[in-house]
Image (tube, rainbow, N blue to C red):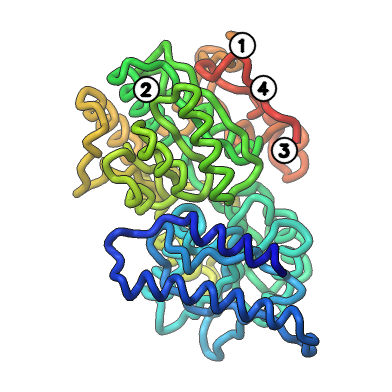
Amino acid sequence: MVSLLASTLFRFTTTHRSEEKSMRKKLWNIVVPILLVSSILLNACAPAAPGAGTKAPTEATAAPAGDAATEAPAADASAVQIPEVVDGKFNVAFVYVGPVGDGGWTYAHNEGRLYLEDVLSDTVHTAYLESVPEGADAERVIRNLARAGFNAIFTTSFGFMDSTATVADEFPDTYFVHVSGYKKNETNFANLFGSMESLKYLVGMIAGARAVADGKKSIGYIAPFPIPEVIRHINAVSMGMRKTCPDCVLDIRWIFTWFDPTIERQAAESLIQSGAAVVITGSDTTGPVQAADEAGVYGVGYDSRNACDVAPKSCLTVPYWNWGPVYVKMVQEMMDKSFKPDDIYFDVDSGALGLLGFMEGQTPSAGVPAEVIPQVQELLAKMQAGDFTRFDVFTGPINNNKGEEVVPAGSSLTQSDLEGIDATVGAEIGRPACTYCMNWLAEGISPDAELPKQ
């Protein structure tokens, strides 16, 4: 119990607060976590009542990036009380790997959930469970949501994929959508993701230009796990970087977590100490952006358009997700029975992806070098028109970080290549095996870098 209290208070005290919050809000944010911790400690010392657990929220106002009150501890699937469905409505549940206040991945998904419930308020009810651990706990949570009568369940982390697939087979009358994976079935289970690698390529161009302007040649990247999604994002950054800074080197820190504010900040500080002019995060919190600001260098956030709020002067941009319209379209199709489970992978022309500072009505950050702005704007316009896609990003010739050709001139990666780390993945899901499997690091990444073994 002491370790739980210490851990909770540590995460609270290291979380960044918005300067625009009023003093009353700050006090509220201090009191609420302490009361919650006290309640947890008291309950832990008392005999457990049958079926007792923590009530999961059915409605939540997504807090601004870094709001401490929303940093929930990981859910214990055996103790979590599943939210109730609402009679007469189409009930949709969301399973999150982090807290809704992470300022990144989960925050963006929860904004999409709120948008869905707002647009379809007459017919749709939503609920969510946050900070659910991947693995067996996730499977129990997903199964219990299906048993509770939810019509659709969205699971939003790569590590939820197998659990979602298992439960989908058990509940053929419930819709399941897994975000960021590659598995599906033909009846009630779809996978969903988007071409973030296209925007990561633009991020690389911006970071390279910033390094040139600062007279530096090192850029840092914080990488969660060595899975195809993360690897292709890193590779896209490196290839974009070399367009504006051919001599730059991309330095990587593997952290093996999606959400850990302390580890993410430590990785950023390590990259900065190694000379990085720009720190780019692929994880879920805004800590690396603030660490860059405190060190007098530049950062690039991820996932949520609000990720620059913690350090607007030092944050160059954020490639972000706009999940709301995607969720609305899918749920509408589910309600009218036209939804077909598929590999749903949208590109920039869908409108569900954005690059902060470069979308309509936005202004580039002051830290973005003037000479790279028209280059980024021109290529982004091609992406939005559908004239430059993820497959164009990954068109040869492409060398790896050892100088060896991995994609010959005139060849482009396929979706199987983008999502497969080896040829077995294609066979597993009934898709052609990958040819240029995503198990290499692109030229521009430190020649000493290797993909860690999982």
Alpha-carbon span between mark 1 and mark 3: 27 Å
**Tag 4–tag 1 contact (CB < 8 Å):** no
**Tag 1–tag 3 contact (CB < 8 Å):** no
- Pick the front one: 24 or 249: 24
Mark 1 or mark 3, whichever is nearer to me: 1
Q: Would residue 34 be found to the left or right of residue 26 on screen?
A: right
Q: Is label 2 in a helix, a strand or a loop?
A: helix
Alpha-carbon span between mark 2 and mark 3: 35 Å
Please state which amino acid type lies under the numbered disc 4. Answer: Glu
Could you tell which of marks 1 and 2 lies nearer the N-terminus?
2
Up/down of 29 relative to 271, above or below: below
Could you tell which of marks 4 and 3 lies nearer the N-terminus?
3
Numbered badge on residue 208:
2
Please state which amino acid type lies under the numbered disc 2. Answer: Gly
Residue drawn 76% across the image and 81% down it: 45
| Residue that carries the numbered disc 4 in the rendered image | 450
Mark 4 surroundings within 10 Å by alpha-carbon count, few (fewer than 14), some (14 through 19), many (20 or more): some
Mark 4 or mark 3, whichever is nearer to me: 4
Q: How far from the left and from the top, in percent, is residue 4?
A: 67, 65
**Tag 4–tag 3 contact (CB < 8 Å):** no
- Pick the front one: 104 or 287: 287
Mark 4 or mark 1, whichever is nearer to me: 4
Could you tell which of marks 4 and 2 lies nearer the N-terminus?
2
- Pick the front one: 398 or 429: 398
| Residue that carries the numbered disc 3 in the rendered image | 426
Alpha-carbon span between mark 4 and mark 2: 22 Å
Alpha-carbon span between mark 4 and mark 1: 10 Å
Please state which amino acid type lies under the numbered disc 3. Answer: Gly
